[in-house]
Image (tube, rainbow, N blue to C red):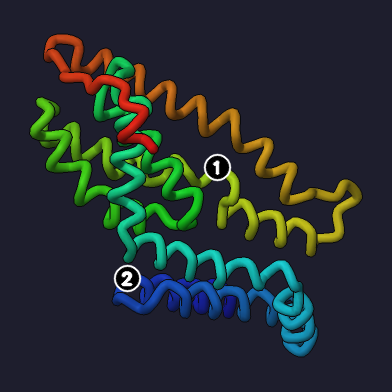
Amino acid sequence: MTLVICSALLLVLAFLGTPLFAIIVAAAMLGFYFADIDLIVVIIELYRIVDTPLLLALPLFTFAGYLLAESNTSHRLVRATQALIGWLPGGLAVVAYCTCAFFTAFTGASGITIVAIGALLLPALTEAGYQEKFSLGLVTTSGSLGLLLAPSLPLILYGIIVQQMNLEQTVEIKDLFIAGIAPALLMIVLLSTWTLWHNRKHPIPLQAFSKDEAI
């Protein structure tokens, strides 16, 4: 009965706007309490996980992402990608998919990609003849394509968590990187195909291949 009351109280607090992290922490503490698990054991286990050297990659990864977002990397990346693959069917849309996937892979966050590259691609997409709603959906969707490409912040974090579980079969982060390549490329191909079909009645301008511009 007490567990039901506490759970209902947490739901009420969530609906009232309590920060989600506080609700999750409180729910976890309640679970440990009703499972008769000493909270000292939880603290020791948290310290053991945080003490993992691999976790140092996470803040450095995020810092590198912000450096890329605040520099002119996004401008140069868009220009290079457009010069290399702008001639493909789909034109700028395919450029947007590939650019966002590459940028997200190195920043680790789709939000950073949308802010850094979306501001460049959205006006260019509308000027190229794509509808505004389609362009908005394209930019926001493309931001998550690179989460499966190495080096990927979610894959690193997932690999660290799985390694701490002491499973019989070990999971290497490099294996996760390799496993994410095929799904990421498949999503890019499917989205590019959908773009061609959706805009089949509207001629989309293409850009000729330019080796000098790419270099």
Q: Quadrant of residue 189?
A: top left
Rendered residue at 50%/48% (across/down) = 105
Q: Residues within 10 Å of mark 1 (few under 14, many from 20)?
A: many
* Whole-percent x, y for residue 108 in the image: 49, 56
Q: Residues within 10 Å of mark 2 (few under 14, many from 20)?
A: few
Rendered residue at 52%/33% (across/down) = 184
Tell me the amino acid under the disc marked 2: Phe
Height in image: 190 above or below 70? above
Which image quarter is the N terminus in?
A: bottom right
Residue named by callout 1: 148
Q: Secondary structure at mark 2?
A: helix
| Residue 100 horizontal side relative to residue 176, left or right | left
Which image quarter is the C terminus in?
A: top left
* Whole-percent x, y for residue 46 in the image: 72, 79
| Residue 78 horizontal side relative to residue 125, left or right | right
Dot 1 or dot 2: first in sequence order is: 2
Residue placed most toward the observer, 76 or 195: 76
Rendered residue at 13%/13% (across/down) = 203
Rendered residue at 27%/16% (across/down) = 196
The answer to whether one can see residue 36 in this image is no
Tell me the amino acid under the disc marked 1: Leu
| Residue 122 horizontal side relative to residue 23, left or right | left
> Residue placed farthest to the top in the image?
201
Residue named by callout 2: 15
